[in-house]
Image (cartoon, rainbow, N blue to C red):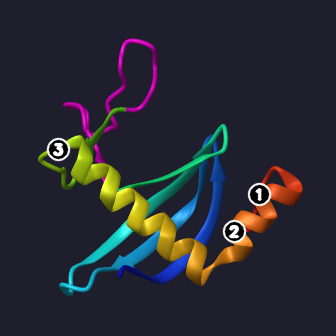
């Protein structure tokens, strides 16, 4: 069973906040972003900015910042199981996150 060691609200787009997540195997994931879009909740492992030759964060042709994964999963099923386990732990340990979203449509820390 995953546990949430720390959660911080941070509302931007679909993002609701960031969590530090521990697994039963002793692996600790830092900066897992928690998102909600159209009633669907999901967790995304941390990413790092892709830097251009000038040392600034690179942007794609539409002007959006480019990010690279710090870790990835072999299959979509494994990714989805990770996400579900994180959201389950968050619901168990921090139900106020979901209550605030349901009541206010926004969760600001």
The answer to whether 52 appears left or right of 93 in the picture is left
Of residue 53 and residue 92, the one placed in the foreground of this image is 92
Of residue 46 and residue 37, the one placed in the foreground of this image is 37
Under circle 2, the secondary element is helix
Q: Percent from the top left, x then y, of residue 34?
A: 52, 58
Residue 54 is one of the magenta-drawn residues = yes
Q: Which callout, 3 or 2, points at the residue further toward the start of the chain?
A: 3
State the residue at coordinates (25%, 33%): 54
The answer to whether 102 appears left or right of 80 in the picture is right
Q: Which residue is mark 2?
A: 97
2 and 1 marks in contact (CB < 8 Å): yes
Q: Which residue is mark 1?
A: 101
Q: Residues within 10 Å of mark 3 (few under 14, many from 20)?
A: few
Tag shown at residue 75: 3
Q: Percent from the top left, x then y, of residue 57?
A: 34, 37
Label 3 to label 1: alpha-carbon separation: 30 Å
Q: How many marks?
A: 3
Label 2 to label 1: alpha-carbon separation: 6 Å
- Which quadrant of the structure image shows residue 21? bottom left
Q: Which callout, 3 or 1, points at the residue further toward the start of the chain?
A: 3
State the residue at coordinates (37%, 12%): 61
Tag shown at residue 46: none
The answer to whether 81 appears left or right of 72 in the picture is right
What segment carries the magenta color? 45-65
Among all residues in the image, which is located at the extreme left?
74
Q: Residues within 10 Å of mark 2 (few under 14, many from 20)?
A: many
Query: Please, is residue 94 above or below residue 34 in the view?
Result: below
Label 3 to label 2: alpha-carbon separation: 28 Å
Q: Residues within 10 Å of mark 1 (few under 14, many from 20)?
A: some
Residue 81 is one of the magenta-drawn residues = no
Under circle 3, the secondary element is loop
- Which quadrant of the structure image shows residue 59? top left
């Amino acid at each position: 069973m995953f546990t949430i060691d720390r959660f911080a609200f941070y509302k931007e787009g679909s993002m609701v906040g960031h969590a530090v997540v521990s697994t039963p195997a002793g692996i600790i994931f830092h900066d897992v972003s928690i998102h909600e879009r159209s009633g669907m909740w999901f967790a995304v492992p941390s990413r790092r900015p892709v830097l251009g030759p000038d040392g600034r964060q690179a942007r794609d042709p539409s002007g959006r910042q480019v990010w690279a994964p710090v870790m990835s999963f072999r299959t979509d099923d494994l990714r989805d199981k990770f996400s579900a386990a994180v959201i389950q732990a968050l619901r168990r340990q921090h139900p106020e996150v979901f209550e605030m979203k349901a009541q206010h449509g926004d969760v600001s820390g």
